[in-house]
Image (cartoon, rainbow, N blue to C red):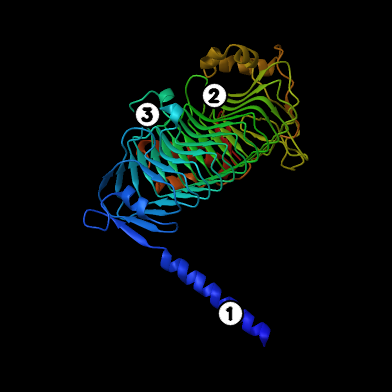
Amino acid sequence: MKRQNLTSVGLILLALVVCRSAVMADTLTVGTTAQFQSIQQAIDVARNGDVIQIQPGTYTGNLTLNKQITLEGIGRPLVHGEGVVSVVTVLADGCVIRGLIIEHSGGDLTREDSGVLLRSNNNRIEDIEMRDVLYGIYLYSSRNNVISRNRIRGRTELESGERGAGLHLWNSHNNKIEDNVISDARDGLYIQSCTGNEIRRNRVFNLRYGLHYMSSNRNRFEDNYFANNVAGAAIMYSNDIEFRRNAFVHNRGFSSFGILFQDCENLIAEENFIIDNATGIFMESLRKTKFRRNTIANNDVALRIFSSSDANVFTENNFISNLSPLQLVGVKTTTRWSENGRGNYWSDYDGYDLNQDGRGDVPLKIQNVFEYMEGNYPRLRIYLDSPAARAMAVAEKAFPILRVSSERDEAPLMKPVALHYPFAEQLQTTRTNHGLVAVSILILLAAAAVIWSGYRPTSYGYQR
C-alpha cells in the first residue's frame, strides 16, 4: 500500500511538471495588428520553449536567437536583413525555424555572412526560401541538426568565386541534410572536417562544385542529384564515405568531371548515375574503394585513373557509349576489373558467350588507341569522335601495333546490369529550372533505355 501511494505521488508530480511546462510555453504573434510588430522584440520577450508565429508581411532587420524558441512563418513572411553579417544567427540549442523567406545578408566571406548561421546544436531549419544571401545556411561547429526542404539561391550578380556555398558545414557532425534545392552559389554543399552526416535527396545545379568535400570521414550520401555544374563532386582527403543512388549529370567545363576523388580510402560507390560529363570519374591516390552497379555513360572520358590509385575494384558497372573508356596517367594501376567472377558491362564489347553464363569468353582490353596521348595531352580529346580517329581505332583492332595499357576485364558482362533511377520522376514534380529539368530527363532516359532493354548498340543498330 505504501509503495502504491508513493507511485501515485510520483505520477502526480510528473503530471504537474508537464502541465507547468505546457502552461509556460507561450505562443507569441508578430504582425502589423498583432501582439508584436518586430520579430526581434518578440524574441527578446520570449522564454525557452515559446513559439513565435509571424504573420504575412515584410520584416526588416537581422535576428539573433539566444534562447530555445520556434520561429514559425504563417503565409511565408519575408525577413529582409540589414545587408551586414547574417540575417539570422542561432546561438541557443534546440531552436526551430520554418516557413520563412530570408534575404539580403552581408557580403563578407571571412565573416560567414549567411541567410542562417548556426553556432549551436539540435536545431531544425526547414521550409525556408533564401535569396540574395552570400552563404545560405552555415553550420559552424554545429551538431545534430536537421536541415530540410529549403530552397537556396545565391547571388547571381557575383562571380562564382565571390559567392559562398549554399550549405557550408565546418566541424559539424551528425547532421541530417535532406530535400534541399540549391542553385547559383559557389559550391552547393561545402563540407570540411565533419563526420557522421547523412545527406539525402538534395538537388544541386548551376554552380561550381555540386559537392566540395574536404577532410571528412564516415558520411553518407544517398539519392542526391548534381547537374549542370562545372563539376559534380570533389571528394578530397576523406575516408569511409558511402555514395548510393546519386546522379552526376551534365557537369561540363574546362577540366570538368562528374566525381573527383583525391587521396581518399575505403569508399563505397553503388548504383550511382554518372552521365554526360567531360570526365566521368577522376581518381588520384584513391585506395581500397569499391565501385559496384554504377552507370557511367555518354562521358567524353569514362575513367581518368592515376597510377597512384591502388587496390580499387570495379564490378557490375555499366559503361555505355563513352567516347573513351579510360585515361591511364602513369604506367599501370592495381585496379581490379572484376570480383567473384563478375566483371562490368561495356557497350562496345564485341566478344561472345558460348557457354551462356552471361560473361564474355574473351577478356576485354580496356583501352583506346589514343589513351597515352589523352593522358598526357588532354586537348587532343576533341578529336576522339572524328572519322579519322574511328578509322585508326578499327585499324588498330585488326592490326595491333601500338603499345597501350594492360588493363583487362577478365569477365565482361554480356548484358547491362538492370537498375532503376527515380530522378526523372522526382524532377518532374520539383520546381527547378524547367530547361535544365527537360534536358536532364532526356539524358537520364536515353541511358536508362539501354540499361532497361538489355540491347547492345552496334554499328548496325541494336541487337539482343
Residue appearing at x 56%, y 48% in the figure = 144
Question: Which of 348/190 is in front?
Answer: 190
Q: Earlier in the sequence, mark 3 or mark 2?
A: 3
Question: Which of 8/223 is in front?
Answer: 8
Which residue has dot 3 on it? Answer: 107
Is residue 375 shown above or below 122? above
Q: Secondary structure at mark 3?
A: loop
Which residue has dot 2 on it? Answer: 300
Q: Of the residues shown, which amino acid type is indicated by label 1?
A: Val
Which residue has dot 1 on it? Answer: 9
Label 3 or label 1, whichever lies nearer to me, is: 1
Between the residue at mark 2 and the residue at mark 1, the CA separation in whole angstroms equals 74 Å
* Res. 14 in view: yes
Q: Of the residues shown, which amino acid type is indicated by label 3?
A: Gly
**Quarter of the image holding residue 30?**
bottom left
Q: What is the x, y in percent for residue 129?
A: 36, 44
Residue appearing at x 65%, y 84% in the figure = 4
Between the residue at mark 3 and the residue at mark 1, the CA separation in whole angstroms equals 58 Å
Between the residue at mark 3 and the residue at mark 2, the CA separation in whole angstroms equals 38 Å
Q: What is the x, y in percent for residue 449?
A: 52, 41
Question: Which of 176/302 is in front?
Answer: 176
Label ID, residue 430 = none
Left or right: 407, with 199 as reference point:
right
Left or right: 332, with 246 as reference point:
right
* Res. 431 in view: no
Q: Of the residues shown, which amino acid type is indicated by label 2?
A: Asp
Q: Secondary structure at mark 2?
A: loop
Q: Quadrant of the N terminus?
A: bottom right
